[in-house]
Image: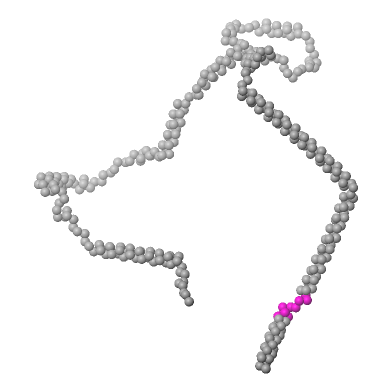
Amino acid sequence: MSTREPIRARYSKQFVDRLIEKRRKEEEERKGEEEKQMKYKFNAVPVPESTYHPTNPRVLMDEYVEAVRARTQQRMARWKSKSSEELWAPKARPVPLTTYIPPKSYAMKRSKSAHERALRLLTEASTPPGLKEHEARTHVRTTLRHRPCTGDFSQHQIPTSVPDFAKLHRKFEEKLGDAQYKPPTVPVPFNLTTTTKSKHKKCLDEEKQEKRTDKRVPVIPKHSPSPIRKTQASEMRERAIREKLELHTSDVMKTEERKREERDRFIRNAHRLKALVGERKSVEEEIRVKAEQKRRELVERQREYERSLREMKDRVEDRPLVVERQGIISSQQALQKRFDQVMKGVEFGGSKS
C-alpha cells in the first residue's frame, strides 16, 4: 500500500514565513541600535586641540598681542570714565512711520492701480477712425438736401422800424368783410388722405429720383445679342437643374398614381365585402349566437369548478385526524413487526426439521 504526503496550504505557510522573517529583521535592527547606543554612551569626547594650542597663528606675534592689549585698556578706561547712569541709560527706538501713516495693503494698491488704469484709458481713448468725418459729411449732406424747402434765412433783413398795426388791422377787417358768406353747419366731404404738400416733398422726390436712377437696370434690346456668354459650367448647372425638376415632377406623378390606385383598390374591396356580408346572415345575429355560446361555456366551466371544489372538500373532511392517523400508522407498524417475527419463527422451525 502506497502512501503520499498530505497537501500543504502553501499560501498560509508563505504568509506565516513572511511574518516571521519580518519580525526577525526588526529584532536584529533593534539589537543593533541598542549596541550602538551602549558603545557611545559612556565614552567622553576628547578635549579639542585649541584648548592647549592656539589656532590663530598671530597670537604668537608680540606686536599683535601688544595691539590687542592697548585696545582693551583704552576700552576699559572709556567705560570707567562714564557714570553708571550713562552706561545703563535706556535708549528709545524711533517711532515707526506706521504709527502716523497706515501701511498700504494689497487691496488698496490693487484698487488704486485699477483707478489709475481707468483714468489712463479714458484720457487715451479716441473715437473710431472715420466717425467724425462721417458725422461732418452727414450734416453737410442733410443741409444741402433740405435747403430748397427750408430756404436760406441767413441773409434775411431784420426790420428796423415799427409796423403800423392800425393799418394792418384795417386791411384784415376789409378782407373779412369782402369774404363770401358761408353757413357754418353745411357738411363738407373730406378725404382721410391730406392733399397738402409736405415742405420736404422736393427733397424726397429728389432722393427717390436718385435711388431710381441708381437701381435702374439697363434695357437690352431684343435684336441685340446676350451680353453674358454661357460657359460649360453654367450649361451643366442648367442641365442638372432641369433634370432634377423633371425627376421631382415624375416622382410627384408616381405618388399621385399610387394613391389613386390604392383608393380604387380600397373601394373595390369595400364593395366586395359588402356583397359577401349581404349573402350571409346578418352580423347582429352572428354576434348574438356567439355570445350565447360563450355564456353557456362559461356556465359549464363554473359548474365543473364548483364540483371539483366540492370533491376536494369531501376528501378533506373524510380524512382522519392527525392523532388518528398516528394511531393507524403505529398499529400498522406493530402488525408489520409481528408479521415479520412470525415469518422468521416459521423459517427457523422449518430449517430445524
Residue 211: give x, y in percent of width and height: 63, 16
Residue 320 belongs to the span the image colors magenta: yes
Is 7 placed left or right of 188 in the picture?
Answer: left
Q: Quadrant of residue 124?
A: top left
Residue 21 x, y percent position in the rendering:
38, 65
Picture residue at 27% right of the left edge, 64% below the top:
38
The boundaries of the magenta stretch are 317-326
Camera sees residue 345: no
Q: Quadrant of residue 40?
A: bottom left
Relative to 259, 30 lies left or right = left
Say which residue appears at 89% left-offset and 52% top-offset.
285
Q: Is residue 1 magenta?
A: no
Query: Vertical placement of 265 versus 334: above or below?
Result: above
Q: Decide if residue 147 is in sight here.
A: yes
Q: Is residue 337 above or below residue 263?
A: below
**Residue 85 spot, x, y in % from top left:** 21, 47
Position of 53 compared to 152: left or right?
left
Q: Horizontal placement of 296 versus 92: left or right?
A: right
Out of 12 and 180, give the one closest to the viewer.
Answer: 12
